[in-house]
Amino acid sequence: MNISPDEAEEALAAIQKVTDKTRRSIAGSGAYIFLIVTGIVWLVGFLSTQFLTGEIVAYIWIGISLLGTALSIPVGIRMGKRVRSPSFGPTAKRATIFWLLLAFYAVAVIAVAQPAEGKQVTMFVILFIMLGQLAMGLILSFSTTWWALPITALALTGYFLLPDFFYLWMGVLVGGGMIAFGLYIRLRW
């Protein structure tokens, strides 16, 4: 099959048009908000873990997590109202059950493994969250899958190569990276 230069150019233009439309759809969906909120939670939580000690760290994590949840729920509800698919209700129910079961298994693995220190528990939690994100992306939308891979790679890199700065690494690179990527999607896509 021979394709002329003009036909090839038209095909590439059509591909670019679909790519641009997909990016605008992702940016317009509001999904970037969850990246920014999660990034802020991780940035504040991990930086406090790196630089503070004692019970205050737990209170900061609890407070910032509750605040992040309080911000995310209305956004999720608002975004959910835009979806008019009859399968959305059952899909949302299955996704909720999946995350609850994944949390149960994460707690079970942590209990069985009995990690020696907080960084190990943190890595278990991060790995389970990223595994859940990958699973949701594979089931619901490939476009939400790919970012879990670099986050996992960054977390493992910090854990194994920079153990003394792991929480700083997680806060700045991973939490800050989520914020930056969310802003990039919102402003550039």
Image: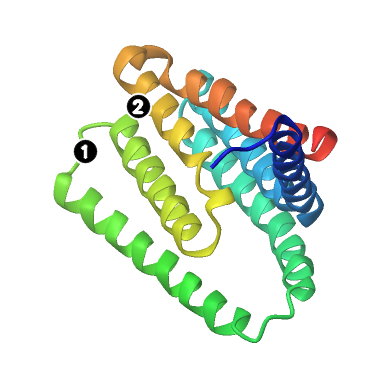
Residue labelled with disc 1:
115
For disc 1, the neighbor class at 10 Å (few under 14, some 14 to 19, many from 20) is some
Q: Are marks 2 and 1 in contact (CB under 8 Å)?
A: no
Give me the residue at 32% from left, 13% from top: 161
Depicted 46 relative to depicted 94: above or below: above
Q: Secondary structure at mark 1?
A: loop
- Which of the two residues, 63 or 154, is positioned nearer the viewer here? 154
The amino acid beneath tag 1 is Pro
Q: Earlier in the sequence, mark 2 or mark 1?
A: 1
Residue labelled with disc 2:
156
Q: Furthest residue to the left?
A: 112
Q: Quadrant of the C terminus?
A: top right
User: Comparing marks 2 and 1, which lies closer to the viewer?
Assistant: 2
Give me the residue at 70% from left, 43% from top: 15
Q: Secondary structure at mark 2?
A: helix
- Which of the two residues, 54 or 91, is positioned nearer the viewer here? 91
- How many numbered marks, from 0 up? 2
For disc 2, the neighbor class at 10 Å (few under 14, some 14 to 19, many from 20) is some
Depicted 78 relative to depicted 164: above or below: below
Give me the residue at 36% from left, 49% from top: 128
Depicted 23 relative to depicted 77: above or below: above
Taking the image as shown, residue 187 lies to the left or right of residue 54, namely: right
Q: Residue 146, how many percent across, how many down?
A: 51, 41
Taking the image as shown, residue 1 lies to the left or right of residue 36, namely: left
Taking the image as shown, residue 189 lies to the left or right of residue 111, namely: right
